[in-house]
Amino acid sequence: MAVEHKWVATYGPAQISPSEILLNAPPVPPAPTLPSDGAGGPPQQPVPQHTFLRSNMEFDQGTISCEMCLEHAGDICLLMLAADPQQGEGGASDSVPGQPIEFELAVGLNALGAPYGFALVRNYKWEPLMGSGQGAALPTGRWVPISIKAVGSTVDLTVDGVRVLSVQRALRKGPIGLFMQGIGPVRFRNWRVHAKRPLCFAVMQFSPDFDQLYEKVIKEQCEAFGYEVVRADEFYTPGHILDDITKSIREAALVIADVTPDNANVYYELGYAHGLGKQTILLCDKRREKLPFDISGYRTVFYDNSIGGKSKVEERLRQFLEVIRPR
């Protein structure tokens, strides 16, 4: 049964109907000023109105399509997508005691000075991320088709059928938001969400012990969180195996790697995943005394390779998955 898509304005004067969302409130007039010399100064510009909305549609992988219409070239219309911080982001100066740092990726028209672009919103503080079309005039008074495609940690922005930007940013499963600002009508319609199961790529040595870990722990737990799970020995294409592996890592939303033995293939694939900024979870048998320095700071589940240890590694893996992709 299809779920009805709903929107709620969390701030500002949005008009919501089943077919369109409209920001059409009159702009705020500027505060009057009294010229000191008795002569009238230049006319003050009206202050634009803005609104935030949230929907019941959750998204982290797949495609969002919509149409946006701006009355003036300086108006703004951006979709807001829950995102994960990258290495080095989210320092103590950004946080509020007792509250997690919230990240969102803003995508659409007029993103902090760029006609088409991405911005990062960190605890309601806006930062430019990537833009395109500087120096060009945004189309006004007509509906502009927009498409946002998220595959793994790659997010593409397509405008009028042309892919204008691509950014590397891991999205987090969460409700889609909408930000609109303008001095004239700003419109949003024909929204469609085609969600896709995120891909989890498992990296490990191929042997009976690790086959059990893969089938009975990794695959079962990740599928319970909505992931499609694959391992390199499950490819049956005629091409080069390394091409399949690198393609799967690029398209993966999550990479799980067992680093118990010093396996060159595992480290190569894990390093490639880290280079792309992928979400990773490491698994390691407790019998290994120490992890290599370069990976010691990543999420790691240490497990006891025994019947009794199975439930513990399942629980620890579930805890990590709950953080990355809440159900």
Image (cartoon, rainbow, N blue to C red):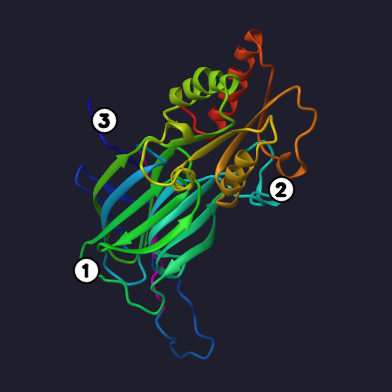
Mark identifier at residue 92: 2
Determine the CA span between mark 1 and mark 2.
44 Å
Is 238 positioned to the left or the right of 131 in the image? left
Q: For the residue carrying disc 2, how many other residues have a C-alpha within 10 Å: few (<14), some (14-19), or many (20+)?
A: few
Q: Which residue is mark 1?
A: 141
Q: Work out which residue is located at the far top of the displayed protein and give it.
A: 308
Q: Residue at x 70, y 41 (%)?
A: 295
Residue 54 disc label: none
Q: Residues within 10 Å of mark 3 (few under 14, many from 20)?
A: few
Q: Tell me, yes or no, whether the two marked residues, 2 and 3, touch with CB atoms within 8 Å.
A: no
Q: Is residue 103 above or below residue 78?
A: above
Q: Is residue 51 magenta?
A: yes
Relative to 256, 82 lies left or right: left
Provide the residue designation for mark 3: 3
Q: Secondary structure at mark 3?
A: loop
Is label 1 or label 3 in front? Answer: 3
Asked if one can make out residue 196 in the rendered structure from this viewpoint, the answer is yes
* Residue range highlighted in magenta: 44-55
Q: Return the x and y of residue 123 as percentages of the image width and height.
A: 57, 49
> Residue at position x 47%, y 20% from top?
220
Query: Of residues 114 and 289, which is closer to you in this image?
Result: 289
Q: Secondary structure at mark 2?
A: helix
Quadrant holding the N terminus: top left
